Amino acid sequence: MFGLFKKKSEVEKLNLKYKQLLEEAHRLSTSNRKLSDDKMHEANEILIEIDKIKSAEKGN
């Protein structure tokens, strides 16, 4: 309950966007393969960003 007003961290925001892109890619996979592949590429780029942030946090 106290987490209600807690701001999301950058990693949490990126995870949400990553999940949304994966869902959209899956939905598009049956109708437009090119757009699905583009969404998967975007999702992978976000995953790389998440990994960079996490590794930077570990280093500190």
Image (cartoon, rainbow, N blue to C red):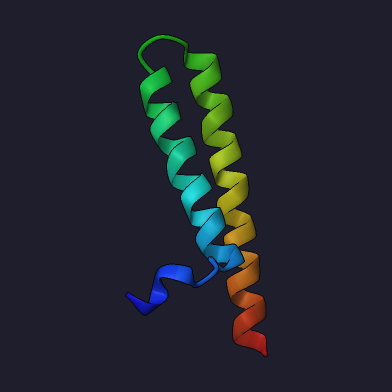
Above/below status of 46 relative to 33: below
Does residue 60 appear to the left or right of 18 in the view shown? right
The furthest residue to the left: 1
Residue drawn at x 53%, y 25% is 37
Residue 58: quarter of image? bottom right
**Residue toward you, 38 or 19:** 19
Which part of the image, by quadrant, shows the C terminus?
bottom right
Above/below status of 7 relative to 56: above
Does residue 58 appear to the left or right of 24 in the view shown? right
Which part of the image, by quadrant, shows the N terminus?
bottom left
Above/below status of 33 relative to 2: above
Residue 44: percent from left, percent from top: 56, 45
Above/below status of 16 relative to 60: above
Residue drawn at x 49%, y 37% is 21
Residue 57: percent from left, percent from top: 62, 81
Residue 13: quarter of image? bottom right
Residue 43: percent from left, percent from top: 54, 42
Residue 56: percent from left, percent from top: 67, 78
Residue drawn at x 61%, y 64% is 10
